[in-house]
Image: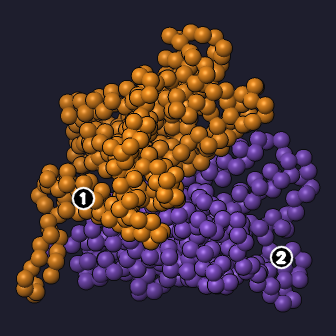
Amino acid sequence: MIRLERRPAPSRAWAWATPLLAVLATMVAGGLLFAFLGKDPLLVIRTIFWDPILGEFAFYYRGQLLVKAGPLILIAIGLSLGFRAGVWNIGAEGQYIMGAICGAAVGLAFYPLEARWLIFPLMVLAGGLGGFLWAMIPGILRTRFNTNEILVSLLLVYVAEQILAWMALGPLRSPDGAGFPGSRNLRHYDSAANHELISGSGMHWGLVAAFIAVILGHVLLSRHILGFNIRLAGASPRAARFAGVNPGLLVLTCLGVSGALAGFAGLFEVAGPAGQINIDFNVGYGFTAIIVAFLGRLHPVGILLAGFLMALTYIGGEAAQATLGVPAAAIQAFQGMLLFFLLALDVMTNYRVRIDARARA
Amino acid sequence: MDLGSINPVLLIAALLLASTPILLAAMGELVVEKSGVLNLGVEGMMIVGAVSGFMAAVESGSPTLGFLAAAAAAAVLALLFGVLTQVLLSNQVATGLGLTLFGLGISSLMGQGYVGIRPPASPRLELPVLSELPVVGPVLFSQHALVYLSLALVLGVWWYLRSTRSGLILRAVGESHEAAHALGYSVLGTRLAAIAFGGALAGLGGACLSLVIVPQWTEGMTAGRGWIALAIVVFGSWRAWRVLLGAYLFGGVSVLQLNLQAAGIAIPVELLSMSPYLITILVLVVISSDKRRAQVNAPNSLGRTFHASG
């Protein structure tokens, strides 16, 4: 008879092994999925995971990899703090949108003034603030009225999408756009543009921010009292209260930080790769970042690696779509599958599998 | 603006139908949560139900087969969640989210060749004589069969949870899984059954959307209805009749805002479109601000992992 026995402490070896095993299992299951779609599974897997890094056109894809990984890492770092403390902000997509709208609005308000030293920093601040305030809505409702932050933060994504559409068609619409939806392109406005720092590398300020977030996140969790409190509240809310942790403040901090980081990510995206506020601006980074956070074991360094892996599935997925005709939706299913395998294999981290030779009485 | 173009009788008749997907999904989730499991994957199960039902109905030409396929497909997906959370003891919040993300992906993959097709029509159930009555006729007696089914389910779930032995066991499992386990009831079996039931209803709700209300398949067509269903279970404080009330309230808001959009009222369309979500949040706040009542009604073991040691 097979049974599970709780480990006294989670296994460190398994904690690092499960993401790798989950990726392998997803490749196998994904390969089956692609075979079912009538594609050569090995070829598809190679196109997704190998070619963008080491294939013929890797020089183009490598830059794209950074562009996609930036927002994923930035958002996931913020989410991981909350997830560790048992605060579930799943509305990062909405905070990302609001950050982009607020930041872009500030930039557009100055148009066509050229003063990069003033405008770009102000936009970054506005972006962070936009995401922060949007995340404060579920935060304050949770602490003040005991409302479930999971549902509120998620429902606010749909509200943010409507605001985005309204902005793209109304207040922020480009006066020179000949009636087309969408704001002015910020990339053509030097004071507001988030240009590549090294041409052709894909490296922009959003990635710099992501790397800083990884480092600060690591320091916070391993060295700072707030990081300790976050981990304590996640492991044992009761012990945290005895230790004098203010639960309401912790909720607000976690939501605020993750909202602000998502807002930054939105701003860097709208001023750089996306270029403008438009109806189809958001592409689901806020949701994929949830997978990134879990795949990275809620650990900053892990999230850095997971962010690149997820970015790879986006890039490779696009390549597979272009060259092999693999539907774009297959990649989304593939990413969801990865989270499933990770959660399923995680049982090994917390439990031992015991096989009893004799049937137990 | 032409508010006179809004016909109150048709509005109420449309409301009952528009609320049905949410009501079905919320009834399923109510049973799941009563058994102590929080399944945040309602949105994913609904959309998988929507696409599978649509495909089955188009291929077979029979809407009934479509509804059955939708319920079955979503129940299978729900059981995936069940195995992960109950057997492999994964975190319910994370797994539920994963279910939603996976469901959204796999549904658009499945529905690739079905965009823009019209499904076979599933006619309303016109009750002879009664449906000819003024006002009550169109409102009560010429609805789609799923509307009646959803109302019967409210009655059935209420009766099941209140007055049957197995309903009592299910509630016991949800209140204290340790105690239920000690008494010899199967926590695992009860919860898996509840999860499958919840999945089937969510799938049925999704198919109601793609086969009856819209009726068409578009990617992401559930548009947050699964999340609203989750919110309605909280709003209804885990009671069947209040969940019914909640579902109709939100059906009302969404039908009304669509009518206002059509009437060309001078409010931005986006503001009207976001109103169902905003009102859901508002009502959640009102309900949960009464801390004591929220705690009394919520199942005690909700969202907690059960591991029978020894």
Q: Position of residue A94 (x, y in %)?
A: 53, 42
Please report, as a chain letter, where disc 2 is located: B
Query: Residue A65: x and y, percent?
Result: 40, 39
Q: Which mark is residue A7?
A: none
Circle 1: is it few (<14), some (14-19), or many (20+) Cα within 10 Å?
some
Look at 74% across and 29% down and name the residue there. A177
Taking the view exactly as shown, the residue that stands out farthest to the bottom is B128
Which residue sits at x=73%, y=72%?
A: B118
**Spot occupied by residue A158 in the image (x, y as percentages of width and height):** 59, 48
Residue B235, located in which quarter of the rendered image? bottom right
Tint of chain A: orange
> On screen, B273 above or below A69?
below
* Secondary structure state at the residue bearing disc 2: helix
In this view of the protein, can residue B210 be seen by the observer? yes
Q: Chain of mark 1?
A: A
Q: Secondary structure at mark 1?
A: helix
- Marks counted in the figure total 2
Q: Amino acid at mark 2?
A: Pro
Quarter in which the C terminus of chain A is drawn: bottom left
Characterize the local packing of mark 2: few (<14), some (14-19) or many (20 or more) Cα atoms within 10 angstroms: some
Chain for colour purple: B
Q: Which mark is residue A21?
A: 1
Is A136 on the left-hand or right-hand side of B131?
Answer: left
Q: Quadrant of residue A71?
A: top left
Question: In the image, is A171 to the left or to the right of A202?
Answer: right
The kind of residue on which mark 1 rests is: Leu
Q: Give the residue number, with chain letter if any, for mark 2.
A: B138
Residue found at x 49% / y 17%? A121
